[in-house]
Image: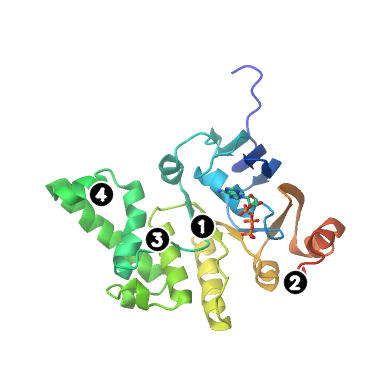
Amino acid sequence: MPGTILPEGWLEAKKISRHFGGIMALTQVSFRLEPGGITSLIGPNGAGKTTLINAITGLYPADAGHIYFQGEDITRLAAHNIAGRGIGRTFQLEELFGSLSVLENVMVGCHVRSRAGMLSCGLALPAARREEQQEREIARANLQRVGLEHKAGDPISRLPLGERKLVGVARALSMNPRFLMLDEPVGGLAAHEIGKLVELIYKLRDEGLTIFIVEHNMPFVMSLSEKVLVLDGGTLIAEGLPEEIQRNEAVIKAYLGEEVAVG
Ligand code: ATP
């Protein structure tokens, strides 16, 4: 189209805004990511971090602005179509199904990409049965990727928090993402669990996934990230290398009064 300015980044947000009633959760947020590597998004409570993930994944689309992924405008696509383009996520409070096994919980991620879907699985059509078998294999492979294949048959409710979070990652991996967003993966984890998560994130990065982390744990963010974005009050106030962010005055000011020190 004449006059159209094409996006330049692999993932690009252009002036995206989102309000909830009178609250402006995001105001004209723009940034650009290139494929590969680990980027983190930080910001005080209520800064708009989860709203940004929700806008990218189509759960709560942006009110204004555009999000491009690999040159395509995905702003108004349905969430399952965005997932189908290769954008996966975990949730802050991972909504796992307590009555299902670990493997079945991971299989839920496969359904997002499945053609026959849950309805035909319920009807036990031959194609659906074949598909279910495939989903089972994909889910098992992803449990292996996060180191939990030995827990496949356990009820999810029996797993400690650290392992439940890894199941959430395996579920997101079952959507076969190229871009993986982790929403507060460290919250509530013990030091040894964080260590396992760090190893997994590096492994996934080395496999070629582009990782995007929303997290409050500053030592974790600063040691792992190649790039850091900072939101405050719905506005992007800084982006740069971890060492630049740690001495950025606007960032330090945004965190004054917060328990977490930047760095
Ligand atoms: P935290 O670090 O505490 O998780 P956050 O940076 O992820 O916070 P958001 O959850 O994105 O912040 O919230 C940004 C603002 O938008 C907050 O004022 C929040 O109350 C509001 N908000 C987010 N989601 C909704 C919603 N579904 N309905 C109403 N207000 C919402």
Mark 2 to mark 3 CA distance (whole Å): 32 Å
Nearest-to-viewer mark from 1 and 3: 3
Q: Is the C-beta of the residue carrying label 2 under 8 Å from the nearest atom of ligand 1?
A: no
* Front residue (pair 2, 206): 2
Nearest-to-viewer mark from 1 and 4: 4
Q: Residues within 10 Å of mark 2 (few under 14, many from 20)?
A: few
| Image disc number at residue 171 | 3
Screen quadrant of the C terminus: bottom right
| Image disc number at residue 259 | 2
Q: Residue at x 47, y 75 (%)?
A: 161
**Residue 200's spot in the image, x, y percent?**
50, 70
First-in-chain label (3 vs 4): 4
Question: What type is the residue that disc 1 sits on?
Answer: Gly
- Colour scheme in use: rainbow
Q: Residue at x 16, y 53 (%)?
A: 129
Q: Is the C-beta of the residue carrying label 3 under 8 Å from the nearest atom of ligand 1?
A: no
| SS type, badge 4 | helix
Asked if one can make out residue 113 in the rendered structure from this viewpoint, the answer is yes
**Residue 18's spot in the image, x, y percent?**
63, 40
| SS type, badge 3 | helix
| Residue denoted by label 1 | 208
Asked if one can make out residue 9 in the rendered structure from this viewpoint, the answer is no
Question: What type is the residue that disc 2 sits on?
Answer: Glu
Screen quadrant of the N terminus: top right
| Residue denoted by label 4 | 118
| SS type, badge 1 | loop
